[in-house]
Amino acid sequence: MKEKKTYKKLNPLLHSQLRLAVVSYLVSNGAAGFNELKSVTGATSGNLSIQLQKLKEAGYINIHKGFKNNYPHTRVEITRKGIDAFEEYVNAIKQYLK
């Protein structure tokens, strides 16, 4: 008789398509500007801002606001906690595929 398989719960914060796209991109690149993330994800400014705030509140990213060439610039950086959460999420997905 086959042993019953139990699946890990997927992190609901990362299960959102936009938040997963942002974290995936940041895991690969370390950091990115707001406009770069907007371009890569195809998100609107408002939606991206809301999702970034949720990731920041969870401690998955840091947001640095400043100026670049006299223009406002927002830089988003992945944290160790964000990388760990992403790796855990990916491992949970792999379990579903086995």
Image (cartoon, rainbow, N blue to C red):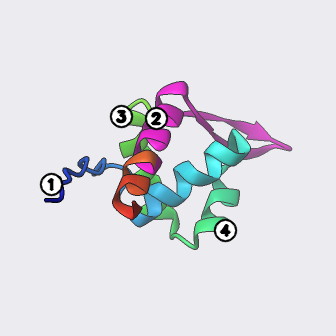
Q: Earlier in the sequence, mark 2 or mark 1?
A: 1
**First in sequence: mark 3 vs mark 1:** 1
Label 3, secondary structure: give it: helix
Residue 76 in picture, x, y percent from top left: 61, 41
Q: Residue furthest bottom?
A: 42
Q: Circle 4 sits in a helix, a strand or a loop, which is it?
A: helix
Tally of marks: 4
Magenta stretch: includes residue 78: yes
The residue singled out by tag 4 in the image is 39
CA gap between label 4 and label 1 equals: 43 Å
In percent of width and height, residue 53 lies at 41, 44
| Label 3 to label 4: alpha-carbon separation | 23 Å
- The N terminus - image quarter: bottom left
Helix, strand or loop status at disc 1 = loop
Give the residues drawn in magenta, as a range.
Answer: 61-90
Front: mark 4 or 1: 1
Please give the residue where the numbered disc 3 appears in the rendered image: 57
Marker disc for residue 4 = 1
* Residue neighbourhood size for the residue with mark 4, other residues' Cα within 10 Å, grouped as few (<14), some (14–19), many (≥20): few
Mark closest to the chain's N terminus, 4 or 1: 1
Q: Is residue 85 visible?
A: yes
**Residue 73 visible in the snapshot:** no
Q: Viewer-nearest of labels 3 and 2?
A: 2
Q: Residue at x 48, y 32 (%)?
A: 84
